[in-house]
Amino acid sequence: MRKVEQISPEARAQPASSVLSRQLLLSLYLPALALSLGTGIATPVIPLFAKSFGVDFGAASLVVILTGFGSLAATLPAGYLMDRIGRRPILLAGPLLTALSAFLIASAHTFPELLVYRFIGGAAAQMWQQSRVTIITDTGAARSRGRQITWMMAMQRVGNLVSPAIGGFLAAGFGLRAPFLVYGALSLLAFVPTYLLVKESTPRRLDRRAADEGAISEWRTVINALRTRQISCYMAAQFLANIARGQAAGSGVVLLYAAYAYDIGPSTLGLLSASNSAIGLPIGFTSGYLMDRFGRKVTIVPGFAGIFVSTLITAATAAFHAPFALFVPAFLLMNGCQSVTGGNLQVLASDLAPAQARGRFFAISRLMSAGGAAFSPVAFSAASSLGYGASFGVRALAALAVSLIIGFGVGETVGRDAQESAPAATRGDALLAKTSASSVADAASPR
């Protein structure tokens, strides 16, 4: 029997997902803002907090690496659970675990404790973002998903506009632990509108036998879809993209490098991160509009080409031991180019994801993304043995590879040359349709 699915009654009851609807303002953009405020407040303090335990740069980089590994570890379980028990429980767990991680970091007294709590924080952030993008894909139309996803990312930049400076001044005035207490409180604040307003959007199967068949075949059909050229190229690009960008624009290991290379304090790190957010904010909003209007590749290909060039410039400042005054504009240029690409590969994934197994598809997509993010600081730290110029060079080459892979290996999914759908992603559904029949037949046939 063929699998039959429908959108859950709760999802149908949700207001239409117009880009600036009251529902989205309160349930998507406001929580994203609150979480980004907390993240931004903690960002300039993390390098100095790690440094306060008396460890060298290689060991201190573990605070970034372990966050990436926490995110990596959460991808597959979160994706599986989203298809089995629903999107909403995973979405609600994200801010709660983020708050727990932040409060535990504030109480850490040894460096290994700090690493464990950063791992938990990475897993929590992955759960929230992965489930939120899946809900947008369930409910958003093709011509609005670009703005919804990239504007969610842009709201994170709104939070980062002032919060790093606040975090730096909090650390300077009240100690390095104070920003993490504020981070935890803001994470709990993000939980409230999410709990009150977000409804379940998981498609519900109408037939019990279809549900049994689906449980057997969903992983298989998604894996078969992954064998196609377009999606395999996309997954490779997703992995390389986060090697190029690191864990987050304007934060992570690059700020750690600045703290060690130039011996700057929390206030300067906070202002540097805030300046980056101010530059990236209008770029992020514009990028979402362009993707919905002209297609996804219009920002992805030139965006990563820009990261390639700007990262090479940053590599030159490191290789030639340029003063801090020259590092700053190179850093801002690099992160401005990253802002062009913020969220756009997730938008592309929303077009490619098969409707009947979105949780699993996003699990693999986010596994590639988190894998790249986790590997990026490892590669950066390892290459630093040859000089920091080599570290930035690795990122530059990864960005160039992404631009070429998307440009030549992945077709456009929205625009004049692409078939559209709302809210389902037709290219992903088409791939699923090609593989589903054979997969279910294989599962049901006698051995």
Image (cartoon, grey):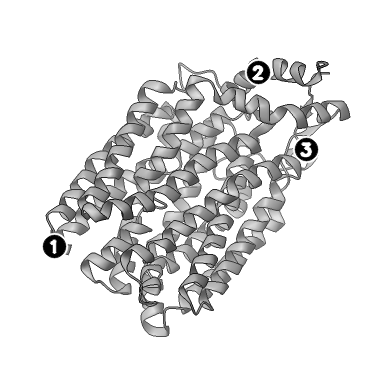
Q: Residues within 10 Å of mark 1 (few under 14, many from 20)?
A: few
Q: Residue at x 61, y 68 (%)?
A: 100
| Residue indicated by mark 1 | 323
| Residue indicated by mark 2 | 435
| Residue 269: percent from left, percent from top | 31, 67
| Residue indicated by mark 3 | 8
Judge left or right: residue 35 versus residue 409: right
**Residue that protrudes farthest toward the bottom in the picture:** 174
- The image quadrant of residue 227 is top right
* Cα distance in 3D space between marks 1 and 3: 58 Å
Q: Nearer the viewer, residue 335 or 47?
A: 47
| Residue type for callout 1 | Pro
Q: Residues within 10 Å of mark 3 (few under 14, many from 20)?
A: some
**Does the CB distance between marks 3 and 2 fall below 8 Å?**
no
| Quarter of the image with the N terminus in it | top right
| Residue 446: percent from left, percent from top | 83, 16
Q: Residue at x 77, y 32 (%)?
A: 215
Give the mark nearer the N terminus: 3 vs 2. 3
- The image quadrant of residue 193 is bottom right
